[in-house]
Image: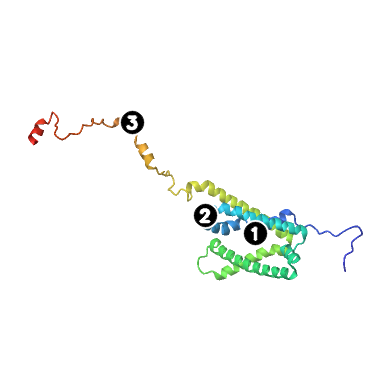
Amino acid sequence: MTATVPAGETLAPRKKLGLLGVMLPGLAQIAPAFNLFFTTGVIASLAGASVPLVFLISTVGFLATGLSLAQFSSVYPSSGSFVTYISRTFGAAVGTATGVITVLGYIITFSGIYIFVGDYIVTNVFGVTGPHVGLTIITTIVYGAIVVIPVILGLQFGVRVTIVLYLIEIVVLLVISLSVLFQGARTGSAARRSPGRPARRRRTSSCRSASRWSPSAASRRPPRSPRRPPIRAGTCPSRSSARCSSAG
């Protein structure tokens, strides 16, 4: 039985999510903690000081992808996302294969992430250092249930929970960053020294030579005797003429 629409009216999709609800789940999945703990360290180990340039170059691809999805969503308005766009462009067979591969990839990827998070919680939160396979499995199952429950309760509830957790994540990262900036210069790795002991500064040779000389030090030095002229062959000073004659 189909619903009838009065004359002059059309069925319009009910809007459930706004712009913020669409953007923040994607941001919460890829940034900022995920990039800080997994991506930035790898990039820094390979690119060194060129990390900002790498992020700028990747921003070009990010903007191109965003503009492409925005254009597709205006041409093919659907909740199927890129699977719908691929199906409308290349055919149903290609779209179905893409969807199946994507689902399998998500299953494999998130399974690895859940196991990693479970092992991380057991090792760093519970402080277990010995064999802990069983505890890791239990922790992973509990973590997976906590993640899945908001999805089962509804889309809007899941998005709201994601937004709250994302804001908490940003606050924690800001606190850590500010603590490193304000305390790292005094007691961090930038200046490793005992407390209460001033840091030593290395002086170059020019600084050392300049610091050794001062007017007061020069005034305390004894005056040097005038330099005597060298004795030439066949000549003798007047005081040592007898010695020169006897030596000759």
Q: Nearer the viewer, residue 173 or 234?
A: 234
Disc 2 crowd, CA 10 A, few/some/many (<14, 14-19, 20+) = few
CA–CA distance in space, label 2 to label 1: 25 Å
Disc 1 crowd, CA 10 A, few/some/many (<14, 14-19, 20+) = few
Q: Quadrant of residue 63?
A: bottom right
Residue 65's x, y, as percent?
A: 68, 58
Q: Is 247 positioned to the left or the right of 17 in the image?
A: left
Label number found at residue 29: 1
Q: Please name the amino acid that badge 2 sits on.
A: Gly
Q: Quadrant of residue 11?
A: bottom right
Q: Nearer the viewer, residue 126 or 22?
A: 22
Q: Please name the amino acid that badge 1 sits on.
A: Gln
Where is mark 3, residue-wise? Answer: 216
CA–CA distance in space, label 3 to label 1: 69 Å
Residue 170's x, y, as percent?
A: 62, 52
* 131 to 8, vertically: above or below: below
Report if residue 54 is visible in the image. Answer: yes
* 106 to 237, vertically: above or below: below
Q: Is 217 positioned to the left or the right of 140 in the image?
A: left
Badge nearest the viewer, 2 or 1: 2
Residue 1's x, y, as percent?
A: 88, 69
Report if residue 165 is visible in the image. Answer: no
Of the residues under marks 3 and 1, which one precedes in the sequence? 1
Of the residues under marks 2 and 3, which one precedes in the sequence? 2
Badge nearest the viewer, 2 or 3: 2
Where is mark 2, residue-wise? Answer: 48
Residue at image coords 59%, 69%: 137
Report helix, strand or loop for mark 3: helix
Residue at image coords 63%, 58%: 30
Q: Please name the amino acid that badge 3 sits on.
A: Ser
Residue 100's x, y, as percent?
A: 69, 70
